Amino acid sequence: MMTFLRQSGPLSAVLAATILAAPLSAAVKDPAFDIVPLGVEGGVVEGSTSAWLIAAHGREQGLACDAGTLVPGIRAAIAKGGFPAGTQASDVLHRRIGAYLITHPHLDHVAGLVMVSPDDSAKPIFALPEVNAALAADYFNWSAWPNMGDRGKPPLLARYRYQDLTAGSDPVPVGETGLTVTAFPLSHSGALSTAFLIRAGKEAVLCMGDTGPDAVERSTRLEALWQAVAPLVSAGHLRAIIIETSYPDPRKDAELFGHLTPAWLHRELSRLTGLAGGGEKVKGLPVVIGHIKPAIDGKAETVGTITRQLAEGNGPPVRYVIAEQGVGLKF
Ligand SMILES: [Zn+2]
Ligand SMILES: [Zn+2]
C-alpha cells in the first residue's frame, strides 16, 4: 500500500484521480509532452484498442504510437474538450498525427490505421523492419486491404512510407513533429513487439507495446530496455512510461500470452528502479497503464481490480495513471 498514500492522500481519492487522469495532468509543471490516449484497451471489444497521440508540449503535430483505434479516440477527445473548439476529427487525423510508430502488427494495434487509410493524409510509418514487413504482407496486400504502402504487392498507392528503424539506434527524427525515436525490441509471447523511446530535446517518454515479463518469456529484452532508459530515469528526464497491464492477478504464467499483470509489472519496475539508483529516483514517475483486457461485460470491474492491485501491491513508488480514452495527459 505504498506510493499512492505517501504521495497524494487518501487512497479512494487517489484512485478516483488516477481513473479520471485529468486532475493529475493538471498538476504537472513545465510539461514536455502532451499525450491523448486514443485507445486504452487490449480487446476484446473494438473502439478503444491501443493508440496514443504524443506531441511535444504545445506543438500541433505529433505522432501516433500504435493505431488500434483512431477516429473513435479522436472523437472522444473532441467531446471531452481536448482540442480547440471547432476541431473536426479529420483535422486531428491530418494535422496532428504526423507519423505512426507501430509496436507490432497485432490487429488491436493497427486496425484504426488500416480502416482510416483511404481518408488519411500521406505519412511515414516507423517500425522495426519485421513489423513493417508484416504490415505490407498481411494488411496492405490487396487482399485484406488495398496496398496503401510503398512496398509489397503492386500497384503501390504509397500513401504510407515505411521507415525501418534499427533497434537501439541513435535518435531518428520523426517527420515534422520535433520528436525523435529509438526502437527497442520486446518479447510478446515469443513474437516481436517494440518499445519506442520518444524524445523532445532532453526529455523523453517511453511508449511500450505488448510485452510479457522476461522471466516468463525467457527473454532479456526488458532487462536491456531498463538498462537503456535507467540513466534517463536517474537524471529525471524520463517523463512517463506507457505500458500494458492486460490482466488482473492472479493469473497463471502459462496463461499470460505475452502480457503483464500488476504483480509482474511491479517486479519489472523494481528491476528498473534498481538500475536507476533506487526508489528515490522513480518516486512519482508517471506509469500510464493501458491495454487492459476487459471481458465483453464487466469492464469497470476489471479496471477497478487492476487499479486496486497496482495501488496495493509491493512495487516501487511510481505514480500509476489509468488512462482513459480521450482524456489528455501532460508530462
Ligand atoms: Zn495488444
Ligand atoms: Zn499483441
Image (spheres, rainbow, N blue to C red):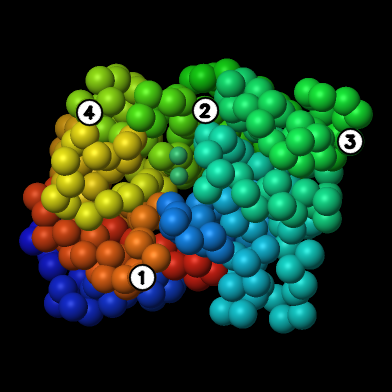
Report how far apart the C-alphas of labels 3 and 4 lie in the structure.
Answer: 41 Å
Residue type at the position of mark 1: Asp
The quarter of the picture where residue 304 lies is bottom left
- Whether the residue under disc 4 has CB within 8 Å of ligand 2: no
Relative placement, left or right, of 246 versus 168 is: left
Q: Earlier in the sequence, mark 3 or mark 4?
A: 3
> Looking at the image, is mark 1 or mark 3 nearer the viewer?
1
Q: Earlier in the sequence, mark 2 or mark 3?
A: 3
Q: Earlier in the sequence, mark 1 or mark 3?
A: 3
Q: What residue did someone put label 1 on? A: 297
| Picture disc at residue 183 | 2
Q: Earlier in the sequence, mark 4 or mark 2?
A: 2
Q: Nearer the viewer, residue 237 or 208?
A: 208
Residue type at the position of mark 3: Leu
Q: Quadrant of ligand 1?
A: top left
Say which quadrant the N terminus sits in: bottom left
Q: What residue did someone put label 3 on? A: 157
| Picture disc at residue 216 | 4
Q: Secondary structure at mark 1?
A: loop
